[in-house]
Amino acid sequence: MTDASLPTPHHLPCTIGDLPVARIAEIAAFAGQRVQIRGWLHNRRSKGKLHFLQLRDGSGIIQAVLFKGDFDEATFARADHLQQESSIVVAGTVRADERAPSGFELQADGLLVVAEAHADYPISPKEHGVAFLMDHRHLWLRSRRQAAILRVRARIVKSIRDFFDSHDYVLVDTPIFTPNACEGTSTLFETDYHDQKAYLSQSGQLYSEATAMALGRVYTFGPTFRAEKSKTRRHLTEFWMVEPEAAFLDLDGVIDLAEDLVCTIAQDVLRDRGPELDLIDSIRSEAEEHRQLKLRREALAAIRKPFIRLDYADAVDQLHELGSDIPFGDDLGGDDETILTQQYDRPIFVRRYPAQVKAFYMKRDPADPVRSLSVDMLAPEGYGEVIGGGQREDDHDTLRAAIEHHKLPMAAFDWYLDLRKYGTVPHGGFGLGLERTVAWVCGLPHVRETIAFPRLMDRLRP
Ligand code: 4AD
Ligand code: MG
């Protein structure tokens, strides 16, 4: 039965004859050949008997040149009125052209309009305000800079996974619905779980500790949630974190692992995403110019071992010399991290924070129980904390006392305490925030551009 009130279904036309379909990223392989390219109209201009269409296919942008003599009158006239973002297929011959950014141009001889875009595409080449762009994030992603950032992000994810896979760390996915807090109770998203209270996971760490006792070396990589009441350039409410955890890994081992991972990410991105980094550098807003960031290739090339290693106490001394009034014993604030990281061109590990500013699971330093065997990695150029981790409390009674001291519900942690009852070992790990890493690698002023659809305190849409 058909419903007469529904429009008649139809297929969109999307091929021109049986010409090979070429992707712009691989266009060099088609030099001299006739092909068709399918995508969207990014921009266009005309000059006399020529139309120049900037065609975007997701993998790149190429200019198609349409000469009046090669087209029937109606098609040529239509090309002069196509709206930005119309979906089109262009057929033509691939010609090498040194002036073109891709090194090639398409000498067009066929044009198929798949779907004409409405005339009011909201994102024009002029500079828009951030709120407007965020409201139109679903379309903003089509701009070259945003697409380049997503490509860098995807490369970083691959780099992280390859790194751990090749170091014999087993990927184990941890739950998102959890009955207890990991990182303190103040930033929990609560949800109803069949008449029980559940919380969205702030970190997979506690579960990773359990799987590390089963598999030796593990990592978890997924979304984590924090009901942060912070409107800063570093905070999302939903962000991705990779968390390695290993049995018999002490604080120094955790730091070495983090250092190797970060060097690998920098090298991989530099090797495989140079053009994207250049593009991101080339389109900077005034606010970004103001930060006087390094060119990203230069910044990444500087990420070499050994990173700076400072104990918390030395970091605070340095901060005092630099004019900060941070009280000894307090956690470093965002501003302190910024000042400190501006002193060095490579990341800094700050070790042995006071136990009182860190989570309940941190192992206390046996040499000085006021301190914890914790570490944060602060990225250069004012990017601040990208990694947090350390060695975990491995003694049953000490851990039990810490849970009590933090006023956490003991019943929710019985399984976690079991890990200290049945063959406890020294162990440790860390969490690296993906969005903060992408922001730093790309030189972005704010984490909101590092994920396709950011979730911020005041943003749940689109
Ligand atoms: O320092 P955090 O809170 O550490 C943990 O969650 C540990 N359980 C990790 C572990 O040892 N397995 O968070 C780790 C990292 C931070 O350094 C930061 O990069 C990122 O997660 N992060 C955030 N990123 C974006 N928005 C937020 N609101 C973030 N909170 C933390
Ligand atoms: Mg932290």
Image: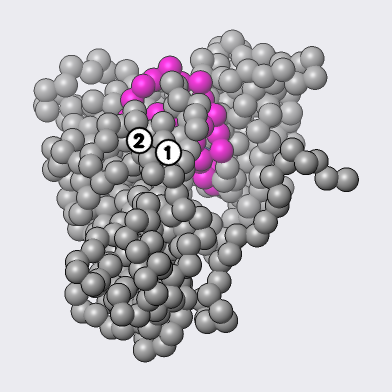
Could you classify mark 2 by the number of other residues whose Cα lies within 10 Å: few (under 14), some (14-19), or many (20 or more)? some
Quadrant for the N terminus, please: top right
Rendering coords of residue 38 (x, y %): 48, 67
Left or right position of 254 against 405: left
Q: Position of residue 126 (x, y in %)?
A: 23, 42
The answer to whether any part of residue 408 appears in the image is yes
The answer to whether 232 appears left or right of 462 in the picture is: left
- Farthest-out residue, right: 1
The Cα atoms of the two marked residues, 2 and 1, are separated by 6 Å
Q: Please report the residue visible at 39 percent of the width from the left and 44 percent of the height from the top.
A: 119
Q: Secondary structure at mark 1?
A: helix
Which residues are drawn in magenta? 223-245
Residue denoted by label 2: 133
Q: Which x, y percent locates residue 258?
A: 42, 49
Residue type at mark 2 is Leu
Near-viewer residue (398 or 53): 53
Rendered view: 307 above or below 130: below
When the figure is inspected, residue 366 is found, relative to residue 307, above or below; the finding is: above
Mark 2 in CB contact with mark 1 (< 8 angstroms): yes
The residue closer to the viewer here, 89 or 270, is 89
Image check: 303 left or right of 82?
A: left
Q: Quadrant of residue 317?
A: top left
- Residue at 56% across / 19% down in the picture? 188
Mark 1 highlights which residue? 137
Question: Does the magenta segment cover residue 91?
Answer: no
Q: Depth check: give the residue in front, 34 or 231.
A: 34
Bin the neighbour count of mark 1 within 10 Å (Cα to Cα): few under 14, some 14-19, many 20 and up.
some
